[in-house]
Amino acid sequence: QVQLVESGGGLVQAGGSLRLSCAASGRTWSQFVMGWFRQAPGKEREFIARVYWSGSSVYEDSVKGRFAISRDNAKDTVYLQMNSLKTEDAGVYYCAAASLLSSGQLSYDYWGQGTQVTVSS
């Protein structure tokens, strides 16, 4: 089992910044690909970014150039630096840990409880 705990959410004005953190505990997390997802009210949860053990990352198009995902393997923590926030970035942000399957697909097996991000205009 892997336990994930997010923090760092809050209220910020449009154009501002926030840094989310996700602390992992339990099984050795180095084997996992770590991702961030967002769910806005009335919408489905959507992929935001993921980071591999090597540090390489993938982003959803709308956050490219504004958000940065990183991981500190020594601290078992993954971060999401969010800059130039827009009102449409608001929602509950979830951290998740994924296993890389033999097919090459990712299976997000573990999820945190989420942290709320509110962006005011």
Image: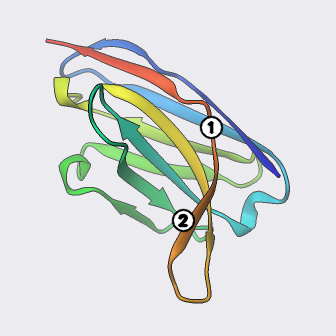
Provide residue 62's location: percent of width, then percent of height. 19, 49
**Residue sticking out furthest to the front:** 42
In the rendering, at what x and y percent does residue 27 appear? 85, 56
The Cα atoms of the two marked residues, 1 and 2, are separated by 21 Å
Q: Is residue 71 above or below residue 14?
A: below
- On the rendered image, what quadrant is the C terminus found in? top left
Mark 1 residue element? loop
Q: Amino acid at mark 1?
A: Gly
Quadrant of the rendered image containing residue 103 = bottom right
Residue highlighted by disc 2: 55
Q: Is residue 121 left or right of residue 65?
A: left
Which residue shows up at 39% across the image and 47% down it?
Answer: 68
- Residue 95, compared with residue 5, is above or below; it is below
For marks 1 and 2, give the one nearer the viewer. 1
Taking depth in this image into account, of 63 and 93 the one nearest to the observer is 93
Residue at the bottom extreme?
103
Q: Is residue 38 left or right of residue 50?
A: left
Residue 112 numbered mark, or none: 1
Residue located farthest toward the left when viewing the structure as drawn: 121
Sequence-first tag of 1 and 2: 2
